[in-house]
Image (cartoon, rainbow, N blue to C red):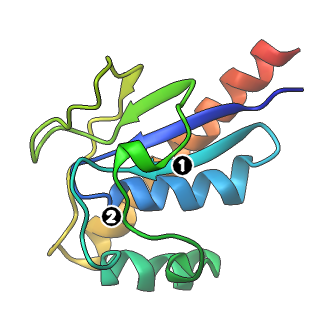
């Protein structure tokens, strides 16, 4: 089976898209390949995202991921915007989906965890949809 390449995109590739890449690899690596990117980069992944992903799932995003631009990842089969509250990133093509997630940067752990849970739910929905297409 040829796995689809999914790109999770937000402007800075430091928080929501990084969480989506990590959860995609953690929960759905058997169905699709997960990548994240932005139109700009940050020197490091959001510290609250890193801390909470370690706490909730034992995932150390700093060990396996870094902030990168869209041209540094393989061409995706599906491109998903994390949400355009900070401005929609331009990647040279239409997005296949927009998850409409608020940026939790600077917010409380509760807000962060709510966004992480929404991303996890979306990952499971995407996995289910792609699993059905492959059968």
For residue 51, which numbered disc appears in the image? none
Distance from the alpha carbon under mark 2 to that under mark 1: 13 Å
Between 76 and 114, the one lying in front of the other is 76
* Residue 19 in the image, given as x and y percentages of width and height: 46, 61
Residue hosting label 2: 15
* Residue 60 in the image, given as x and y percentages of width and height: 57, 82
Is disc 2 placed on a helix, strand or loop?
loop
Is disc 1 placed on a helix, strand or loop?
strand
* Residue 72 in the image, given as x and y percentages of width and height: 44, 50
Q: How many marks?
A: 2
Q: Is residue 123 left or right of residue 105?
A: right
Q: Is residue 132 left or right of residue 33?
A: right
Residue hosting label 1: 35
Instruction: Tell me the residue at 35%/56% (across/down).
Output: 16
Q: Is residue 85 left or right of residue 21?
A: left
Between 51 and 74, the one lying in front of the other is 74
Q: Residues within 10 Å of mark 2 (few under 14, many from 20)?
A: many
Instruction: Tell me the residue at 68%/43% (across/down).
Output: 33
Q: Quadrant of residue 98?
A: top left
The image shows residue 7, relative to residue 105, as above or below, that is above
């Amino acid at each position: 089976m040829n796995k689809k390449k999914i790109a999770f995109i937000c402007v800075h590739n430091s928080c929501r898209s990084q969480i989506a890449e990590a959860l995609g690899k953690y929960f759905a690596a058997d169905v699709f390949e997960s990548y994240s990117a932005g139109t700009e980069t940050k020197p490091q992944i959001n510290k609250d995202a890193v801390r909470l992903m370690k706490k909730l799932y034992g995932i150390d995003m700093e060990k396996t991921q870094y902030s990168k631009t869209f041209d540094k990842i393989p061409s995706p089969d599906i491109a998903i915007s994390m949400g355009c509250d900070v401005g929609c990133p331009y990647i040279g093509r239409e997005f296949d989906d927009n998850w409409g997630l608020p940026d939790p940067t600077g917010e409380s752990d509760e807000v962060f965890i709510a966004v992480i849970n929404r991303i996890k739910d979306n990952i499971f929905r995407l996995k289910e949809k792609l699993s059905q297409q492959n059968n």
